[in-house]
Amino acid sequence: MDRDMPGPMTPFDELVTTPELQMIKLLIPYAPASGRQTLAALVKYTELRKAVRLFHSGGRCPGIRAFEEPAPDTPADLLEQMRPYLAPQQASALDIIVRVQEMMPLVEMLQASGAMSGNAGEGSGPGFDFTDLLAGMLTPEQQEMFAEYSEMFSHSQQSDQKGDHKDGQ
């Protein structure tokens, strides 16, 4: 039987779970029906207890240092760090969004120069918006994701233009 391989564990999951807990999780479906809920609760309780200890260890736990790294500089960096944990369909949608965001400065430059403002091609009127054209090529779910990320990127660009940099520049 061909089964999808599970995705990689997040760094946080690697800190709060053990190989033994992973084995118990794999065995839960094969346990008697009356014991499945108890086993699942035991696993989650053990992970919660370990997570609480991890953050209350006062930095003595070597793994907690992974959470002291600086946050990604841009939303694009954050999305790239999330990429290994996404399903293939989600990663594909993410790629589309990143490519569109990379094209946006070019589109804005073309709009500012007037190349897309009415005489550039058929069907492009004075109010032509390239993002509307791109959004029309996406599924409704991708359109919603595109709108969310577009807003997130525009806020990031506005902050950069105002001089709100993390390093004080």
Image (spheres, grey):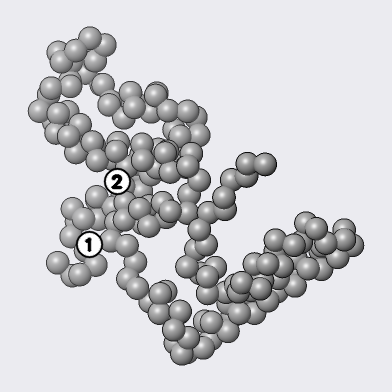
Measure the C-alpha gap from mark 1 to mark 2.
Answer: 14 Å
Which is nearer the N-term, disc 1 or disc 2? 2
Give the residue at x 14% y 28%: 110
Examine the image and state in which quarter residue 121 appears: top left
Nearest the viewer among 84 and 19 is 19
Horizontally, residue 12 falls left or right of residue 74, namely: right
Examine the image and state in which quarter residue 18 appears: bottom right
Give the residue at x 70% y 74%: 45
Q: Which residue is mark 2?
A: 154
Marks 1/2 in contact by CB < 8 Å: the verdict is no
- The quarter in which the N terminus is drawn is top right
Give the residue at x 49% y 29%: 140
Horizontally, residue 162 falls left or right of residue 26, namely: left
- Per the image, label 2 sits on a secondary structure element best described as helix
Examine the image and state in which quarter residue 122 appears: top left
Q: Which residue is mark 1?
A: 164
